Amino acid sequence: MANPNLMSLEDALSHLLSEAPVVTRVETVGLADSLGRVLAENHYVPADVPPADNSAVDGYALRKQDLHQDQAIPVSARIPAGEAPNALAPGTAARIFTGSEIPEGADSVVMQERVEVTDAGIIVRAEVTEGQNIRRRGQDLTRGDLALVKGTQVRPHEMGLLASMGVARVAVLARLKVAILSTGDELVDPGTPLAPGQIYNSNRFTLIGLLTQAGCEVALCETLRDKREATRETLLRAAESSDLIITSGGVSVGEEDHVRAVLEESGSLSLWRMAIKPGKPVAFGAIGGTPVLGLPGNPGSVLVTFLVVGMPYIRKCQGRNHEDPAGERIPADFSVASTSMRREFVRARKEPRGSELVVTAFPNQSSGILSSACWANGLAVIPENTTVSPGDLLTYYSFAELVS
Ligand code: AMP
Ligand code: MG
């Protein structure tokens, strides 16, 4: 049964994604610096890759019809990789190496291991099929084809592919600039002794790590005190220097929740009681034209809401073509007897059990604790209104997949 007062994750995401402003600033980077960046334009293939037929092995290039049972054929040329070969003299073979261009007139390459070398030339001791051991011109990329589309996030192999096309510098979308604002008079930064009533600001560092992994630039990082005017001033300043403001804490309905009040007064705000656990209160709004994602204050909730709500939004803002994390279906190795109307994201671990994989849950799933997340390597999903018995299949997402 769905609770009409709670917003489903799907509804929240479809609202968020429909409003996500995609970065349009473009910069050009050297190919070596392009890892993780998002291509700002399509890449068409300027010339065939490889540019010519070449040998897949070390051996001898020849024309199949010149081979006669047990007869030696003379070796008339040697073609090292990197040299443009002359045409093959009829009735002869050319010594050739992996990557060397196939000489005109040759139609096959015989591996050196299949050949007996004699004074009169080589005797081929194997069946030869025309075309064997030849890598064809354009077999990787054909001139004019669309090799990589705009919105692709560059991985190491995309760097290699671009290099194979001769691309030295590449146009990428600017990194999303994100401001991190922590809220609460109780927060102090690590490095300072704690006074009574204080705690260390952990969310700030969790968010720095997550945003860095997500390829964002942390534009600003400040702590908002529980004061209305100071909160307003900092939010407006953050809006000027960032594409997105992420706050933690201060968005529930307590009287010290000034972020909510300032957004309502000076910007806009939707406060969602989301049907997810942890992370019920999530706010989305804007100030000074910059979107604001208001995450809860509890450290466990910050992690989960960032991963399941923040990341899809950030990917869209980054201009990435990205498939949603697929997750894996893995049998549970734990039980949950009571049901919840909220979908629960359990800090979990995928582990081998004998020859099987199972997903195990950290015993304490309190939203206030982070050690559970450090023990875990991902999140397992318990659907709404569902109990769990050992062996039940659950969807599990690794942290790496969620933040990719
Ligand atoms: P709030 O939403 O501001 O009421 O915060 C909920 C809980 O999260 C409170 O226990 C806060 O002390 C805690 N909290 C809020 N922000 C942080 C932070 N940046 N680091 C660690 N704990 C926090
Ligand atoms: Mg607070």
Image (spheres, helix red, strand yellow):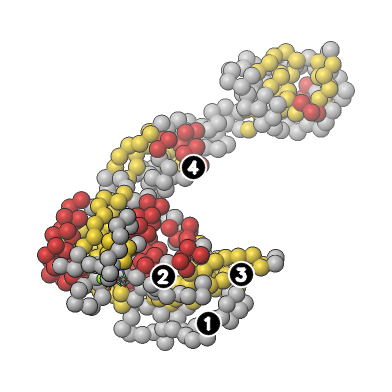
The residue sitting at 62% across, 15% down in the picture is: 86
Q: Quadrant of the C terminus?
A: bottom left
Query: Any mark on residue 388, and which?
Result: none
Q: Name the foreground residue: 46 vs 116.
A: 116
Q: Earlier in the sequence, mark 1 or mark 4?
A: 4
Q: Amino acid at mark 2?
A: Ile
Residue 271 image point, x, y percent: 25, 74
> Helix, strand or loop at disc 2?
loop
Instruction: Give the mark, 2 or 3, whose residue is nearer the N terminus.
Output: 3
51 shown above or below 377: above
Vertical relation: 149 (above or below) 382: above
Specify which label sits upstream in the sequence, 3 or 4.
Answer: 4
Q: Secondary structure at mark 4?
A: helix
- Residue at the location (32% across, 45% down)? 173
In the image, is the residue at mark 3 within 8 Å of ligand 1 by its beta carbon? no
Above or below 279: residue 307: above
Q: Quadrant of ligand 1?
A: bottom left
Q: Disc 1 marks which amino acid? A: Val
* Spatial CA span between label 2 and label 1: 19 Å
Q: Could you classify mark 2 by the number of other residues whose Cα lies within 10 Å: few (under 14), some (14-19), or many (20 or more)?
A: some
Give the SS element for disc 3.
strand
Question: Which residue does the numbered mark 4 point to in the structure image?
Answer: 156
Which residue was labeled with disc 2?
Answer: 369
Q: What residue sits 47% from the left and 33% below the top?
A: 163
